[in-house]
Amino acid sequence: MFSAPRFLRYLRWLWLRSPSWYLAAPFAAATVFALFFYFTIGPESTDFSHMVPRFNLEAVMPWVFSSFIFGSVFTAIHLASRHLANNEEAVSFMSLPVSTLERWLGSLFGILVAIPLFSYISIAAFYLLLGLFRGLIKYPFPDFGSVLPLLSLGLVSYYVMAPLAFAIGVLKPKRAVVWYILVGIIIMVALPVTVSSLPEEQVLIDIPETPSPSNLVGLFFQGSYTESSLGFALGSKVGFLVPSIVAALAFIAVHYIGLRHKQV
Amino acid sequence: MIIHLQQVSLRYGREEPVLEQVDLRMPGGGIVGLAAPNGVGKTSLFKMLVGLRYPSSGTVEVMGQDPTKRSASFLQQVYFLPAEPNLPAWTPAKIGRVQGAFYPNFSSEIYQECLDDFQVDPARPLGKLSFGQQRRVQLAFALGVRTPLLLLDEPTIGLDVNGKDQFRRSLIKATEAGQTVILATHLLNEVGPVLDRLVVLHKRQVWAHVDLTEASNIYSYHHSSYPPQAGTNAFGRRVPGGWHIVRADGGPSSAQPDLETLYLGLTDGNLVDPTFQSSIDV
């Protein structure tokens, strides 16, 4: 049974027990990806709109996924080794008197809300520092808002991969790694195939000249975002959202089943 | 019955089973010792009782519930203290405040009292305490949660002589309210004075289940210069100056009872437990 006070207590427990670097680690890959992307295009460019014709979702998305698979695997392996594969940690985690539903919701809250939120904050701070540094050496540098679209690409990918990463932590590590590789391959193969079958106008979407933090909100209302940079990130409902949601639900199910049947 | 195992077997993968067709019915209340050779399944049995490991076959019932469901209400009634440190590296005070809040019967007074008895500074983070002191914090917390069933795996590891004595006293004090405590240990003589019953696991089975009050009417202990003769339903353990002998003759003892000698006699020495058939239905 679900109990709200106990669940809040559990969230607090998770928060207190999590190493602080969890907040930034899953998005380290996002930073690397965004910086690599930015510097590949050139430091003088602060206007991403000219890049639009060169973007090809089919070509870019597998690479985006590769970046985030790396980041997710890194986090998941650590989660598995520290919290669930480590016997004493696992005993502590699994014998805490909370229900399976609360354990599952708490984990999901951490992976889907808390980690991305604080990672974004850490990345913003990182960009602020980098901007300061580049300002000192007289190079133009885009403000944080202009790199948000790139990070949003990462966020979407992260949301697809995170439940899977957590499933790794819950299932037995060896079996989970097999699951991970298998499903990762399916996604990386299926997505480009799906996207390549779409009409070109659905794949190449204009990016506005002044992306703003409000784009993030669009992430949660994906259907209405078709003309923004996030529209680009999301592609189309058919090409990206459906497989993403199906994958996420499948992994959430794996995670839930895993927590219910996890043995220490 | 607080614990009821029926035909329980447990195996890890394709390996030989750790437990095979085990039956056990244990009444509530008291302090029970669980003794077994290394690798025979004490910790595995504990994990099955708390729902961390599922039996390969058979049924496990603890306080009338199926532990594998791991319901919150069940986990609030059982506390398992593993042999290794498992508490967060917080201060003992914070552990009591944050972790203790999950247990409805948690008594911060008993916890604090145990910390005081164990002479542990509640403001010092666990990571800065020695292993023995960390163990004391773990034990204090285990006694403070006041769950109806308390499973302690090797509780006296890392404790010095004073710590062991303090632990025994705290254990008696904390269990006066009717808790059932099961101690898995290799050091029977360290906890022997507080035990009410002894369960022996051997050859993948519950080999003996001895009520230690009744045992004084069944077993007698003697010191002798010679080992017991074969076929006399007695077992002798070599000690300095001769042999410490336990006999299943119901006669008067001429030496101090010794649980480790009894355990060895039951497992290695073919000493019979005449109460065993009935004791599983104690």
Image: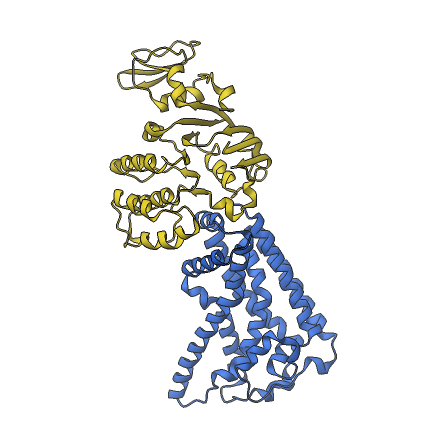
Chain colours: A blue, B yellow
Residue B268 shows in this picture: no
Q: Nearer the viewer, residue B191 or A43?
A: B191
Residue B172 relative to residue A36: left or right: left
- Image position, residue B25 (x, y; %): 52, 28
- Image position, residue B118 (x, y; %): 27, 43
Q: Is B233 rendered above or below residue A253?
A: above
- Image position, residue A202 (x, y; %): 71, 80
Q: Nearer the viewer, residue B140 or A37?
A: B140
Q: Quadrant of residue A65?
A: bottom right
Identify the residue at the far front of this view: B177
Q: How many numbered marks have been drawn onto this rendered protein structure? A: 0
Give me the residue at 65% from left, 79% from top: A224
- Image position, residue B231 (x, y; %): 44, 9
Give me the residue at 47% from left, 71% from top: A119
Residue B119 relative to residue B18: left or right: left
Q: Is A26 rendered above or below residue A227?
A: above
Q: Is A69 rendered above or below residue B185?
A: below
Residue A262 shows in this picture: yes
Q: Nearer the viewer, residue B104 or A69?
A: B104
Residue A229 relative to residue B196: left or right: right
